[in-house]
Image: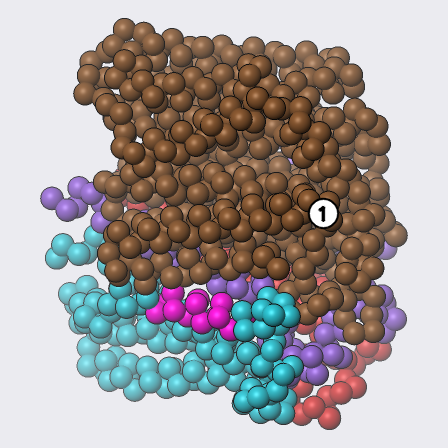
Chain colours: A brown, B purple, C cyan, D red
């Protein structure tokens, strides 16, 4: 079974990095690329298995069945990979591989690089661990691995004050959020005695108590912190611009998705789906989604720093995804809920690709022109035609122009919000208006009159061009056949996600 | 303004948690025979089957390394990452090399 | 760190550091029988490292501390841990094959060589925690003192 | 009545979050992180306590296998979870210290309000 290798290979890569760095830079870089390429291979194999068989994969660590001898409750940690987890794992491995490839060239002038590659592999490992685990405390441990690796990587350039300040703010907010999540998990263990998500769903369904609701509130609060919802998004608008661009591509594209959105969805749909009045939780998530939508995109318009603009637009897009999940929760049984959820999941994958591309282009511009300030960067298209083309594709996709992949997922969210409650559709469209305004402004600076900061800018090296090229082709391919993707991948994902009964029987029924 | 909002939220959380800690609304402390079986059935399983399934007489280490060994390898990775991060953050600045 | 801790502290440190090391090794090796384990034992031995730094000063500690070696040892500890967990991969990722299938590590519970791969993992984690904590301590104490 | 263990755990949590609202020194905030972690650990450990009709429980370690077979034992899972969570707390503290040392070198002060150059 290939599933354990999804964790073994990055772990092997991370632990052996100090040894490989003894053999010199070339060997270390090649080893990092090899490990992330292998992880991508394993992730696509796992995704293909789950997708072709439409079967939930349950893998117990340490025995064949999770249940103890002669008892009906699970006692071991188990992995429970459904289509949603496998899809996000594939996105993580794909964007992670491109980020490692990109940072070979981009981080060439930095010091302390063998620690950098250790941290980037561990960041990818943490996210992969979150996405496949079926045990709540294990989810917390891998959330901490991901968070600690991202704290260190945000502040990796310790000789710049932005890096240190953003790192400290990100660390304190992140640690508070993790403490909330640990408190929620502790309360759940205290009340129900088990840590396995599926058996917890059974116990909560049997006697939903006040402790269960308080724990859900704490977990939701912690995870909204982690996914950068509005009242607590300040860390995100500082951390993502200050990090090196290959890292902010992974941060914006993957970390807030695997550590925030995926966890929110898994807890809401696989543990608590039937045992709470799901409408209020749905409306709560919708409220935060709309708030994030408006504030994120509105703040993006007024930014002068390119990467801060992208960071705020990430906050805005997270608002879309939260809106989709909120409607999916509020209209739980109906067709509208399915469409909204399919749109949210589809948008998670799309946004990961789009935002990674945008941050990689910003990195290329920063690498060559040396400045992020939009006012000084006008007219860069003449000097760096390919990067500007890449930026154009990314901006068009994120705004939602038809031939590219952003259109399909945003359209699903519009459609479901319009059907469910026209007021939400109005907010969603307003958000897109702000987003379009922000990106048009950047496009104009790209194609304006060349300024002096841009004189000596030229195309970046090959290792930075290839990831951008791959991302462009991925976005265009996903854009050309959106409805096939939606029907064959996204809707089955939604069905498996909402099928809580099967999620539970796969474990408790003795896999 | 932000502080007072934060303080109010904090007091609210403390109040909710204290309600949850009350025996007849939520969590119980010092559980006895039948209640112990009801609430801590997994602990009871480990105490009874720990030795024959793992072989170590220290049940906590049995759990840490065999039943929940995957947590501990995640744990070792957390330690590995934090040490790599701390050493990376405390390295020389680029200007120190001149 | 130029001032010296004096002869008394040095001789006391010379006397106690080996003892702390032995006690830490005991806690690691007997992790699966008596209270303790890889993490606690490794931290105890790292305590001996801190005592060495305080008693003998930074310059002395810097000579004995080779950063490359410590990070390689840390990686090695992690790889041993991973290797021990992959022994039973045919059945499942963390399958305790040394205990279930008998062999050297399948002694009577309570003896040293029992509990399957637990002793190997304890040693690996002990090595990892010791080298990790000492290299973190040295990184913090050497910060900006590399010039003098 | 609310057991004393839970009250102490939640008060430690309250102290930790209080420090984040009102204290400005970075080192105090780092210590507050540790206080919050210790509060949650106390809460977790107190879930494992067991009282079998008055007899005090022992640690779940079978030193002499025959003698301890029947005696009530404290729950081992919270101890395993707290062991993992303590090491996570140590790692967060190590990283926070490294960041604070660099911040002191950049800003010359440990006051978090001085770290305001990035518009929040």
Q: Residues within 10 Å of mark 1 (few under 14, many from 20)?
A: few
Place of residue C102 in the rendered image (x, y in percent of width and height, measured from the top left): 61, 87
Place of residue A82 in the rendered image (x, y in percent of width and height, measured from the top left): 69, 46
Give me the chain letter of mark 1: A
**Above or below A161: residue A71:** below
**Residue indicated by mark 1:** A53
At x 58% / y 73%, what residue is drawn?
C88
**Above or below D60: residue A102:** above
Q: Is D116 in front, or is A491?
A: A491
Residue C76 included in the magenta stretch of the image: yes
**Quadrant where the image shows the N terminus of chain D:** bottom right
At x 61% / y 70%, what residue is drawn?
C90
Q: Is A229 in front, or is A339?
A: A339
At x 66% / y 18%, what residue is drawn?
A411
Position of A140 compared to C53: left or right? right
At x 30% / y 87%, what residue is drawn?
C15
Residue C37 visible in rendering: yes
Position of A118 compared to A312: left or right? left
**Quadrant where the image shows the C terminus of chain D:** top left
Position of A491 compared to C142: left or right? right
**Above or below A325: residue B86:** below
Q: Under tag 1, what secondary structure?
A: helix
Residue A267 visible in rendering: no
State whether the magenta stretch is mostly helix, strand or loop: helix
Residue A328 included in the magenta stretch of the image: no
Place of residue A294 in the rendered image (x, y in percent of width and height, measured from the top left): 59, 18
Place of residue D45 in the rendered image (x, y in percent of width and height, measured from the top left): 66, 65
Position of A39 compared to A385: left or right? right
Q: Is A37 in front, or is C55?
A: A37
**Total tally of numbered discs in the picture:** 1
Q: Which residues are magenta?
A: C73-85
Q: Is C82 in front, or is D95?
A: C82
């Amino acid at each position: 079974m290939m599933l354990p290798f999804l964790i073994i290979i990055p772990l092997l890569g991370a632990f052996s990095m100090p040894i490989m760095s003894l053999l010199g830079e070339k060997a270390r870089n090649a080893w990092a690329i090899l490990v992330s390429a292998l992880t991508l291979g394993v992730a696509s194999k796992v995704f293909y298995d789950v997708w072709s068989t439409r079967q939930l994969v349950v893998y117990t660590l340490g025995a064949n069945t999770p249940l103890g001898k002669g008892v009906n409750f699970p006692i071991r940690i188990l992995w429970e990979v459904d289509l949603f987890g496998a899809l996000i794992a594939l996105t993580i491995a794909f964007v992670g591989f491109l980020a490692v490839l990109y940072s070979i060239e981009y981080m060439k002038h930095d010091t302390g690089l063998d620690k950098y590659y250790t941290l980037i592999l561990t960041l990818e490992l943490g996210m992969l661990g979150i996405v496949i685990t079926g045990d709540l405390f294990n989810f917390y441990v891998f959330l901490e691995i991901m968070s600690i690796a991202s704290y260190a990587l945000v502040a990796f350039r310790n000789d710049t004050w932005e890096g240190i300040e953003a790192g400290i703010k990100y660390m304190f907010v992140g640690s508070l959020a993790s403490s909330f999540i640990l408190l929620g998990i502790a309360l759940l263990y205290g009340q129900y005695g088990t840590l396995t998500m599926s058996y917890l769903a059974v116990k909560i369904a049997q006697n939903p108590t006040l402790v269960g609701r308080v724990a859900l509130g704490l977990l939701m609060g912690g995870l909204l912190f982690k996914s950068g919802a509005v009242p607590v998004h300040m860390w995100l608008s500082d951390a993502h611009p200050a990090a090196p661009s290959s890292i902010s591509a992974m941060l914006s594209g993957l970390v807030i998705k695997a550590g925030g959105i995926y966890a929110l969805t898994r807890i809401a749909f696989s543990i608590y789906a039937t045992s709470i009045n799901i409408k209020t939780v749905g409306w709560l998530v919708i409220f935060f989604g709309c708030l994030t939508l408006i504030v994120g995109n509105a703040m993006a318009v007024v930014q002068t720093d390119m990467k801060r603009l992208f960071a705020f637009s990430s906050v805005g897009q997270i608002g879309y995804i939260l809106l989709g999940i909120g409607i999916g929760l509020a209209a739980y049984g109906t067709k509208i809920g399915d469409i909204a959820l399919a749109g949210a999941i589809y948008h998670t994958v799309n946004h990961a690709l789009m935002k990674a591309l945008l941050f990689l282009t910003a990195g290329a511009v920063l690498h060559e022109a040396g400045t992020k300030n939009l006012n000084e960067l006008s007219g860069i298209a003449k000097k760096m035609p390919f990067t500007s083309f890449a930026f154009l594709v990314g901006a068009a996709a994120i705004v939602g122009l038809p031939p590219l992949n952003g259109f399909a997922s945003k359209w699903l969210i519009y459609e479901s919000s319009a059907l469910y409650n026209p007021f939400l559709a109005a907010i969603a469209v307003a958000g897109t208006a702000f987003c379009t305004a922000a990106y048009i402004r950047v496009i104009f600076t790209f194609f304006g009159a060349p300024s002096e900061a841009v004189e000596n800018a030229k195309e970046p090296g090959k290792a930075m061009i290839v990831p951008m090229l791959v991302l462009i082709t991925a976005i265009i391919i996903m854009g050309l056949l959106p409805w096939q993707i939606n029907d064959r991948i996204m809707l089955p994902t939604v069905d498996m996600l909402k099928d809580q009964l099967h999620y539970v029987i796969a474990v408790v029924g003795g896999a | 303004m932000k502080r007072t909002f934060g303080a109010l939220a904090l007091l609210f959380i403390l109040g909710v948690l204290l309600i949850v800690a009350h025996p007849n609304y939520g969590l119980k402390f010092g559980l006895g025979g039948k209640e112990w079986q009801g609430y801590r059935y997994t602990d009871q399983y480990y105490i009874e089957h720990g030795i024959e399934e793992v072989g170590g007489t220290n049940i906590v280490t049995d759990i840490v390394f065999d039943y929940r060994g995957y947590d501990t390898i995640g744990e070792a990775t957390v330690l590995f990452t934090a040490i790599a991060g701390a050493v990376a953050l405390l390295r020389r600045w680029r200007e120190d090399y001149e | 760190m130029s001032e010296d801790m004096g002869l008394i502290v040095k001789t006391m440190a010379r006397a106690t550091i080996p003892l702390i090391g032995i006690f830490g090794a005991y806690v690691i090796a007997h992790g699966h029988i008596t209270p303790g384990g890889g993490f606690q034992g490794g931290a105890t031995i790292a305590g001996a490292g801190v005592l060495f730094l305080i008693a003998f000063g930074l310059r002395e500690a810097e000579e004995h501390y080779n950063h490359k070696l410590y990070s390689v040892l840390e990686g090695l500890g992690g790889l041993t841990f991973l290797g021990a967990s992959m022994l039973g991969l045919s059945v499942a990722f963390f399958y305790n094959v040394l205990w279930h299938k008998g062999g050297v590590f399948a002694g009577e519970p309570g003896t040293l060589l029992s509990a399957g791969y637990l002793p190997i993992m304890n040693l690996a984690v002990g090595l990892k925690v010791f080298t990790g904590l000492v290299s973190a301590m040295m990184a913090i104490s050497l910060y900006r003192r590399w010039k003098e | 009545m609310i057991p004393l263990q839970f009250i102490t755990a939640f008060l430690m949590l309250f102290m930790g979050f209080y420090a984040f609202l009102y204290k400005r020194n970075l080192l105090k905030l780092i210590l507050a992180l540790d206080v919050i972690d210790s509060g949650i650990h106390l809460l977790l450990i107190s879930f494992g306590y067991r009282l079998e009709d008055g007899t005090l429980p022992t640690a779940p370690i079978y030193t002499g296998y025959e003698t301890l077979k029947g005696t009530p034992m404290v729950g081992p899972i919270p101890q395993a979870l707290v062991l993992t969570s303590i090491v996570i707390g140590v790692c967060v503290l190590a990283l926070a210290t490294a960041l604070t040392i660099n911040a002191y070198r950049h800003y010359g002060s440990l006051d978090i309000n001085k770290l305001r150059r990035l518009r929040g």
